[in-house]
Amino acid sequence: MASQNRVTPSAEGLAASARAASGKGLPPVHQWNPPDCGDLDMRIARDGTWYYLGTPIGRFELVKLFSSILRKDGERYVLVTPVEKVGIKVDDAPFVAQDFEAEGQGEAQVLRFETHVGDVTTAGPDAPIRVVRDPETGEPSPYVLVRDNLEALIDRKSFYRLVELGTDHDVNGTSWFGLWSSGSFFPIILSEELPR
């Protein structure tokens, strides 16, 4: 019986496989089930910077390519191609929402976010906004779902702008301050806790 050569995963090999699998739009990573090849020394920092072997990846096109083959399996983030799957480290969320557009007002408002790699997502029932508050400092960390269990951390300047669009709304008998988008209300903070 012939022995198989085990290939050590590398960023270059992943990029080549991703390019070969890319067509129009995002690759169907949810349909791929390749062998797990372990972890790669790649990390996405909280500010959205991608690192390989401890060095920032400076080429936007390469970061965009890698982000297109990113998937979350349980609590593990992986880069997936038709032939291999490797784990990477994500400090917080894999994307950063750097800007947004708001159309309409009140319940008719629609919030559309753009990430640092050019993904666009419209907040709504299938792309919720959630806010996690640090238990010690109370500092909010707001997120919006981009695709398939992958979230974007909403950057500070965008969050401040969002707060200006917020309103109070009753949720199950409790008043919350939050945001409307695509007919859904997303609570941010209890109205009584909001400094006025």
Image (cartoon, helix red, strand yellow):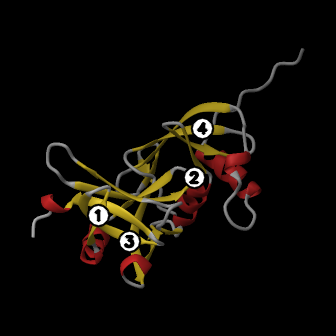
Q: Earlier in the sequence, mark 1 or mark 3?
A: 1
Furthest-left residue in this view: 196
Say which of marks 3 and 2 sits in front.
Answer: 3
Of callouts 1 and 2, which one flags the residue occurring earlier in the amino acid sequence? Answer: 2
The one of 156 and 145 positioned closer to us in this rendering: 145
Element under disc 1: strand
User: Which badge, 3 or 4, is on the more N-terminal residue?
Assistant: 4
Q: CA distance from mark 3 to mark 4?
A: 37 Å
Label 1 to label 2, Cα distance in Å? 29 Å
Name the front one of labels 1 and 3. Answer: 1
Say the numbered circle drawn on residue 131.
none
Q: Amino acid at mark 3?
A: Trp
Residue at label 4?
Answer: 86
Q: Secondary structure at mark 2?
A: loop
Which residue is more in the foreground, 189 or 9? 189
Specify the farthest residue to the front.
Answer: 173
Point out the image quarter for the N terminus: top right
> Which residue carries the number 1 mark?
170
Alpha carbon separation for disc pair 4 and 1: 44 Å
Residue type at mark 2: give it: Asp
Mark nearest the camera among 3 and 4 is 3
In whole angstroms, how far apart are the C-alphas of marks 4 and 2?
18 Å
Q: Residue at x 45, y 66 (%)?
A: 116
Q: Which residue is mark 3?
A: 180
Asked which quadrant contains residue 95, the reply is bottom left
Q: Mark 1, mark 2: which one is toward the viewer?
A: 1
Write the residue at 52% across / 70% down. 118
User: In the drawing, does residue 31 fall left or right of residue 79?
Assistant: right
**Residue corresponding to mark 2:** 148
- The residue drawn where x is 61% and y is 57% is 68
